[in-house]
C-alpha cells in the first residue's frame, strides 16, 4: 500500500523554525517527485515547492522562496520541508504529495498520492 505520512508539525512562535518530514512507504522515492502544499482555514490549497527524488532538483513557488527548503534522504525514503522565520500567516495544515510524473511542479492534479497532513500553528 502506497502511503505518505507527514510529521513534525506543532506550535511555534513567530520567527521560529520547524522541519516537517514526509515518510513514504509502499514505494521508493527514487522514482517519484514529492510536493509540499498547505491549506489554511478558509483559504485555497497553496503549493510550496517540490523535489525530484531522482536528481534532487527543486522548484518553489515564488512566494515561498527564501524561507522554505525542501530536501530528501532517499536512504530513509523521506522528504523534508525546512521552514525558517515562520510567520503567523504560515499557520496551515501542511501536506506532502507524491507522483511518478517527472516534473509536476505544483499542479495538485498531477499528484496521485497525498498524506493526511500535519498542523502547523505559528503564534504571534
Image (tube, rainbow, N blue to C red):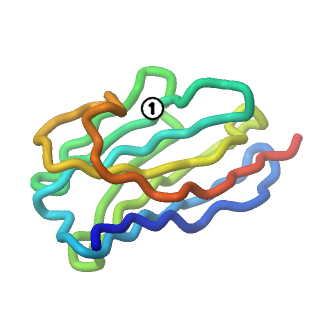
Q: Quadrant of residue 108?
A: top left
At x 79%, y 44%, the residue is: 14
- Outermost residue toward the front? 1
Q: Taking 24 as reference, is 13 left or right?
A: right
- Outermost residue toward the bottom? 75
The one of 33 and 74 positioned closer to us in this rendering: 33
Q: Residue 47, image x and y in percent?
A: 45, 32
Q: Residue 4, image x and y in percent?
A: 39, 64
- Outermost residue toward the top? 62
Which quadrant, please, contains the N terminus? bottom left
Q: Residue 5, image x and y in percent?
A: 46, 67
At x 59%, y 25%, the residue is: 44
Q: Is residue 92 above or below residue 5?
A: above
Q: Quadrant of residue 43?
A: top right
At x 16%, y 36%, the residue is: 103
**Residue placed under numbered mark 1 in the picture:** 47
Amino acid at each position: 500500500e502506497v502511503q505518505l505520512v507527514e510529521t513534525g508539525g506543532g506550535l511555534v512562535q513567530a520567527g521560529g523554525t520547524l522541519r516537517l518530514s514526509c515518510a513514504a512507504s509502499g514505494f521508493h522515492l527514487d522514482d517519484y517527485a514529492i510536493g509540499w502544499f498547505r491549506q489554511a482555514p478558509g483559504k485555497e490549497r497553496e503549493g510550496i515547492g517540490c523535489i525530484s527524488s531522482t536528481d534532487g532538483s527543486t522548484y518553489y513557488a515564488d512566494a515561498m522562496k527564501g524561507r522554505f527548503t525542501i530536501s530528501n534522504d532517499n536512504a530513509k525514503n523521506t522528504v523534508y520541508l525546512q521552514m525558517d522565520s515562520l510567520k503567523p500567516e504560515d499557520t496551515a495544515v501542511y501536506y506532502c504529495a507524491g507522483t511518478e510524473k517527472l516534473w509536476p511542479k505544483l499542479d495538485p492534479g498531477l499528484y496521485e498520492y497525498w498524506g493526511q497532513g500535519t498542523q502547523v500553528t505559528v503564534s504571534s
